[in-house]
Image (cartoon, rainbow, N blue to C red):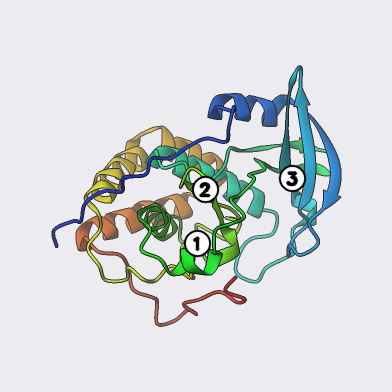
Amino acid sequence: MTAPESEPAVKPSNPPGMHDEEALTLLRDGRLEVAGRLVEATNMTLYCSVKLGERSAACVYKPVRGERPLWDFPDGTLAAREVAAYEVSQATGWRIVPPTVYREGPFGPGMVQLWIDTEREIDLMRLVKSRNPVVRRMAVFDAVVNNADRKGGHLLPLPTGHVYGVDHGVCFSVEDKLRTVLWQWRGKPLAREAVAVLAKLERDLESGALGRRLRELLTMAEVEATWQRVRRLLDTGVHPYPSEGWPAIPWPPI
């Protein structure tokens, strides 16, 4: 295994004034009201408000009934995959995915995720092409969840330097479908921090709470394939290369 590189200096951060557990309780138990629709999204994506007592926030609601059928993912599973991606994100400690739950809403069950206000002054193309260590964490995360659609527009930079990632409905396939704009580290040694996080993920997937939770959201084969991807990253010690049998970059890339 090649020697890992040093870890990032920027630590994950929460949205101002909202801890993860507070956000999850609000998203899970609050009153959900639809305010509008994000028309550029492929699947039905609704901009909503959610309120519980004195707490309120903006959020995104993606009902299962609004999912467009795909040839390579089972129908009605995208919302659960988004929640599974959040569970993996939390297990890494990197908080890549904003707080996300699966719940009933005005149009039936679906995924509800905290809305993130981004830093508008950041050049997104420059961020995508950068060697930013926080973005590098996302590249590792995408390799673990087998993200088939990491567009540049799915990166949400914050003024603190943290970067969230969204839109994880097409993850966790048992086939190699990694498709991303973040290939700048391909073949490079994994950072020391990433190796430690992957080792923890391997244990959590094999016999810990993460494995049990993912089995509630995914098939057994998909959970096993996730463990295998983590194991492969640890065995090689490097960021993966693009697959020869699958497009390397999503379209459109942003």
Residue marked by disc 1: 147
x 76%, y 65%: residue: 40
x 30%, y 44%: residue: 197
- Upstream in the sequence, badge 3 or badge 1? 3
Element class at badge 3: strand
Point out residue 56 in the picture as x, y percentages from the top left corner: 74, 27
Element class at badge 1: loop
Extreme front residue here?
121
Query: Cα distance, mark 3 to mark 2?
Result: 16 Å
Query: Cα distance, mark 2 to mark 1?
Result: 9 Å
Q: Amino acid at mark 2?
A: Ala
Quarter of image, res 12: top left
Would you say 149 lies left or right of 94 here? right
Residue marked by disc 3: 61
**Label at residue 237:** none
Q: Amino acid at mark 3?
A: Tyr
Point out residue 105 in the picture as x, y percentages from the top left corner: 80, 38
Element class at badge 2: helix
